Image (cartoon, helix red, strand yellow):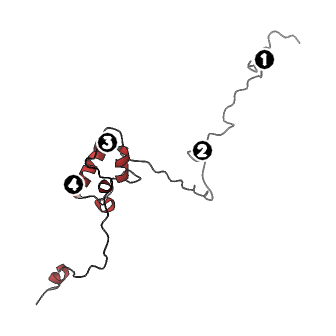
Amino acid sequence: MTSKKNKARAPKETNPKKFKKKTSVLVTDKIDYVDYKDVNLLTRFVSDRSKIRNRRVTGNTVQQQRDIANAIKNSREMALLAYTKRVSTTRPGRPPRDGERGPRRDAAPAADAVTDEVDTDGIDAVTDTEGTEA
């Protein structure tokens, strides 16, 4: 008599999803040594956010993936590759709420706060009253 545990662990005979194994870029380009200075090659193994891609995605062997990862880490240390890339998304602003209190923090200061009265000649608008007679 077999228990449920053993049935669950038994290997399945049928594999419904057959997939074709990916060929590595290193094999197709016949590259023996992965150099950390070859930025064009290394960027093929990095995502748009500068994450190292999986073996499953790139099709590398274990040794190739190890060499690629070490080369990417070296080139990042030497500032040839960026550690991260900033991806900016533009989000629409929130619509104003009813009964919003006060100005927003990021709003510009009011235009009528303090103004200096300066004559067009560059002289202050202060008049001299001592030299005039009535």
Mark 4 touches mark 1? (CB < 8 Å): no
Q: Residue furthest left?
A: 1
Secondary structure category for the residue under label 4: helix
Query: Which one is in front in this view, the residue at disc 2 or the one at disc 3?
Result: 3
The spot of residue 73 in percent (x, y) is 29, 45
The residue that disc 1 covers is 127
Residue 107: mark in rendering: 2
Q: Upstream in the sequence, badge 2 or badge 4?
A: 4
Q: Residues within 10 Å of mark 4 (few under 14, many from 20)?
A: few
The amino acid on which the numbered mark 2 sits, given as a three-letter code, is Ala
Tag 4 near tag 3, CB within 8 Å? no
- Which label sits in the foreground, 2 or 1? 2
Q: CA distance from mark 4 to mark 1?
A: 87 Å
Residue on which the image places disc 3 = 75
What secondary structure is found at the residue carrying circle 2? loop
- Determine the secondary structure under disc 1: loop
- Give the distance between the C-alpha atoms of the residues marked 2 and 4, in whole angstroms: 56 Å
